[in-house]
Amino acid sequence: MIAALGLVGSKWKALILWELHPGHRRFGELRQRLHGVSDKVLSEKLRQLEADGVIRREVCATAHGPVQQHVRYSLTPLGRSLADALRPVRDWGAAHLATAGRDRL
């Protein structure tokens, strides 16, 4: 349990993992989906997750030429297994919010 919590470590990391679970996302897509995260915090958490081997950062050239690039992020096999392990936690939270009310958390 300590190993998993050490990798996740914060609400933003867990939410990033969850947003990457369906597939790759660009930075702007993550920022839009993670309401309230600053660019600085998102960049920091992405770097940490990449350093831990949980996500992959891929620089892609666009059709407009080699100078214009975009970056996309995706889960590594380690990250996918960690995101799968978070699913029961998400399900528990959804069930708890439905029965206890959001203001009690």
Image (spheres, helix red, strand yellow):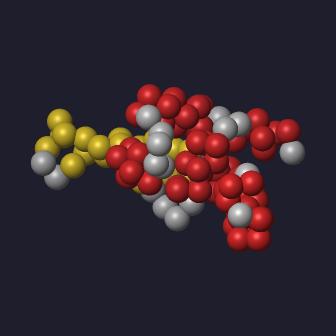
Asked whether 92 or 14 is in front, the reply is 92
Residue 32 is situated, as x and y percent measured from the top left of the image, at 39, 51
Note whether 73 is above or below 9 in the view shown: below
Picture quadrant where residue 55 is located:
top right
Residue 40 is situated, as x and y percent measured from the top left of the image, at 44, 28
Q: Could you tell me if residue 81 is visible in this image?
A: no
Residue 65 is situated, as x and y percent measured from the top left of the image, at 14, 44
Q: Could you tell me if residue 6 is visible in this image?
A: yes
The residue lying at 77 percent from left, 65 percent from top is 100
Note whether 95 is above or below 47 in the view shown: below
Residue 25 falls left or right of residue 44 = left
Asked whether 22 or 87 is in front, the reply is 87
Picture quadrant where residue 9 is located:
top right
The residue lying at 85 percent from left, 39 percent from top is 2
Q: Exactly how many numbered labels are in the figure?
A: 0
Residue 67 is situated, as x and y percent measured from the top left of the image, at 17, 36
Picture quadrant where residue 7 is located:
top right
Residue 88 falls left or right of residue 11 = right
- Give the residue at the far right of this rendering: 1
The residue lying at 48 percent from left, 49 percent from top is 34
Q: Quadrant of the N terminus?
A: top right
